[in-house]
Structure formats: C-alpha cells, structure tokens
Image (tube, rainbow, N blue to C red):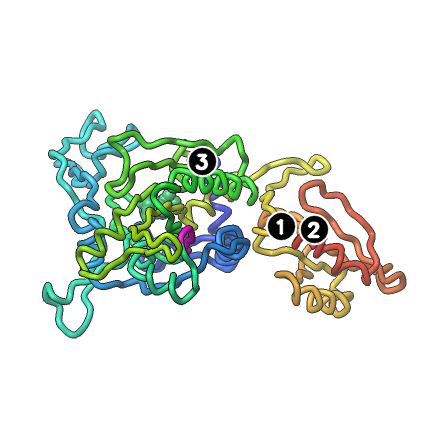
Amino acid sequence: MDLMEKLVSLCLRRGFIYPSSEIYGGINGFWDYGPLGCELRNNIKAAWWQQVVREREDVVGLDSSIIAHPETWVASGHVANFHDPMVDCRLCKHRFRADQIDAEDRCSESKDGKHDLTEPRQFNLMLKTSVGATEDASATAYLRAETCQSIFLDFKRVMQSSRQRPPFGIAQVGKAFRNEINPRNFIFRSREFEQMEMEFFTHPKDAGRWFEEWRELRMRWHQGIGIQPDKLRWHEHGDDERPHYAAEAFDIEFEFPFGWRELEGIHNRTDYDLKAHSKHSGKELTYTDPDSKERYTPYVIETSVGVDRCLLAVLSSAYTEDEVGSEARTLLRLSPALAPVKVAVLPLSKKLSEPTRRIAVDLRRRFHTVFDATGAIGRRYRRQDEIGTPYCVTYDFDSEQDHKVTVRERDSTEQERLGLDQLAAYLSERILGY
Ligand code: GAP
C-alpha cells in the first residue's frame, strides 16, 4: 500500500473521514468528517484563527451567509471567468479537466488506453441553486465559490463597527463550493470544502510590504502546526497562471503523497474587488484618511487556505510507522494542539474503572480526554498512537496506595510516574503550553 492508500484506510477505519452518503453509493467530491476528523478540523481552524485574528489588533472576524446576492458573482468576475477547460472522451464517455489529464487516466474502452478526446470547452465551476418559490432565471443564486467576496461587500460595515482603519484585515472561515470537473486525490479537490481566508486592506503604497509580511507569517504558521518544513515550498505564479483578480500571486505548496500541489494562495488583489463591487452596486467603497484627508480605494492582500487540504497535509506529515520492542506500530505525530484526543485515561484492569474515570472527568474540563478500559494495555496504547493522542495516563493497583499514575508520551513511548495532584498542571504545560 502506498502512503495515500494507508491514509485513506486509517481515516475510514478510525473515524476521521468517510465518503458522503455512502449507503447510496457515495457522491463524487463530497466527504463527511467523523468524530476524530471534526475534532482535527476544529483544531486546525482554531490554530488559524489564533494566529490570524486573536493574536493581532488589526484583524477582525466575519461569518457571512453562504448565499449572497447573485450580482456579487457577476461583479467579482466569477460568472464570466470562473471556468475550467473540459474535454470528453468519445469512447468511455468520461469527462476530464483538459489541463489535468495525465498518464493514470487510461481509457477503459480503447485498446491502447488512449482517450479519444473532444476539443476543450469552457465549463463554469459555480454551483447554482434557486432561492424562493419560483425556479426561473430571476431566482438563480450561487453557492459561494470563495468566502472572500462577502468580506468585500461588508468591508465598510466591518471597518466602521469595529473602529478599524487601513491597514486592517477581515478574516472568515467557511464552506465554499465548486463544481469541479474531476474531484480527486481524496479530500484534496472536492466540490464542497472549507476555506480560511483573510483580506488585509491597505494603502496602495504599502501593499508590497504587507504582501511580504503575510507571506512570511503564513509559511511560519504551517511549520508551527507541525507540517514538515522540507515538504513546504513557494511557487510564484507566472503571467499565464495568475487568477484574474491578482497582480501578484504566490502559492505555498506541500509535497502530498501524489506530488507537490497548492496548499495556500497568497495574492495581491489590488483594488480589483472593491472597485468592481462599487461600480456594480453604485455604492462607494473607498476610505478617507481622517488625518491626510486622502480618499482612496484600499488594496487587498489575501491569504487563502483550504481546511481540507491543510488537514491532508497535516495527516501526511504526521503519519509514521516504527517499531516498539520489535513490534510494528503506526502513529500520527500530531502536535498536541492539533491532536483530536489530547489524553487517554486507562485503568490497568477493569476493576480500577471507577477511580480512573474520575481522573478523566477532571481532565475533560481542560482537554479532550477519552477513557478506555478494553483490551490489553499495549493494544490500548497502539490504538491511541494511531490517532495521534500525545499522552496516555494509566491507573494501576499501586495508584490506589501511592496516588500516582503513569504518563506515557506517544513519540518516545517514555513513561513517567507522577502524583495525581501534579497531573493536570503537567499535561497543561505540555498540551496548552502554560
Ligand atoms: N479567494 C481566493 C481563492 O479562493 P483559490 O486558490 O482558488 O483562491 C484557495 O483557493 C485555497 O482553497 C486553495 O489554496 C486550496 O487550499 C483551497 N481549495 C480551492 N479549491 C479547492 C477544492 N476544490 N477542494 C479543496 N480545497 C480547495
């Protein structure tokens, strides 16, 4: 099995990720996150929010509706420009993205495996729905293709109500939808996914400086959450690759099991969006500096990363196979901040369940803690290693007398005997950092 197959199998088996609507045969490009997957997602989103919003005075949050006024997408250029080139095979009837068809895509109907492809046609990626009781053209609305457009629409409201002024940013985490022609590589390219986006509004003359600053911060964030630095690199977009709104664009790429691919995009969107929405809506979206009285349309530096892609990068980085006492084990070397379960509390024998459970109840007020009394202790450790739990706490027969427990660290498997009165502080320091 290659790494990707191992990850998919672990995700399914241990409750990280399942195909959506599996009992009906699934639906291509949609995924469900199980109990551990949604914990991991939430932890990634919390780590992002912490760096981008909470640790700064100059970035505030927003949670806008998924469906915006349809004119939003006309003004943004998505209705006219958000296309991928599509080709069909005349033999096997499969549809592909013309720029992504590769050697793996073999035709099942031809002798040499080669497709008989049509000329490329443009295919719009926006997912449509209709709002209200009619279903005619006037009721057509779109599921947002990126979360940032509402940030531009709400720019003035947010600026005024939060008493911000450029340079300042607005951050949002939320679902986005794209009718991808070929969803593939597990959760890497799906039709429903989640983005973490931040739009930073600045005077045009300072845009270059902020672009560099955000590039550095975002690269550091990926390394900080435990993604291997040697699997991260920059890719600068050439003139032919840049999205229609960007004057400058860099991707942070990650070496996924299927190769180097985009993880995050950092763009200098100039005043493209604010001007487009201003023109289209007839509403002014400028800023007047109260000191210099200069009126200008701010430039926007954008950082945009998918939660799902980030989760896949985190899992690929963390997946490890090693040996403990000549026994093979699989572990996820997740950082304690991201690990779905922080502590597993284990009674050595079922007879010790009651006092052990009391420890779990106490720890649960601080961290996600599970209690597990079934199976040999070695097997219970392996079970936790496989989902990345950084600490296991074992309560044994001696604990009854000496009020001490054994704390086992996941990566080193080292064990330490610790007084129960020290346990919460010991774990807090290592898991929360204080
Ligand atoms: N607002 C800018 C924007 O949306 P993008 O490069 O199209 O830029 C940003 O998307 C990020 O969203 C990507 O770097 C990726 O992490 C994520 N993303 C985009 N399309 C995706 C898809 N179909 N499935 C999963 N994640 C996706």
Give, as a three-letter code, the residue at label 2.
Arg
Determine whether label 3 and label 1 are within 8 Å by CB: no
**SS of the residue under disc 1:** loop
Question: Which residue occupies the foreground of this view, 328 or 8?
Answer: 8
Circle nearer the N terminus (3, 1): 3
What mark, if any, has residue 254 been given in the picture? 3
Residue appearing at x 24%, y 33% in the figure: 99
The extreme front residue here reads: 292
Residue appearing at x 73%, y 69% in the figure: 358
Q: Which residue is mark 1?
A: 336
Give, as a three-letter code, the residue at label 3.
Phe
- Any part of residue 269 in sight: yes
Is 57 left or right of 145, judged from the image as shown?
A: right
Tell me the chief SS of the magenta region: strand
**Crowd class of label 1 (few under 14; some 14 to 19; many from 20; radius 10 Å):** many
Is 60 left or right of 92, judged from the image as shown?
A: right
CA–CA distance in space, label 2 to label 1? 8 Å
Is 43 left or right of 350, judged from the image as shown?
A: left
* Location of residue 97 in the rendering, given as x and y in whole percent from the top left corner: 23, 38
117 is higher (above) or lower (below) than 195: above
Residue appearing at x 60%, y 43% in the figure: 333
* Location of residue 398 in the rendering, given as x and y in whole percent from the top left corner: 87, 59
- Any part of residue 14 in sight: no
CA–CA distance in space, label 3 to label 2? 28 Å
Ligand 1 within 8 angstroms of badge 1 C-beta:
no
Determine whether label 2 and label 1 are within 8 Å by CB: yes
Circle nearer the N terminus (3, 2): 3
Which residue range is magenta in the image?
Answer: 166-171
**SS of the residue under disc 2:** helix
Looking at the rendered image, the quarter that the C terminus falls into is bottom right
Q: Which residue is mark 2?
A: 430
107 is higher (above) or lower (below) than 83: above
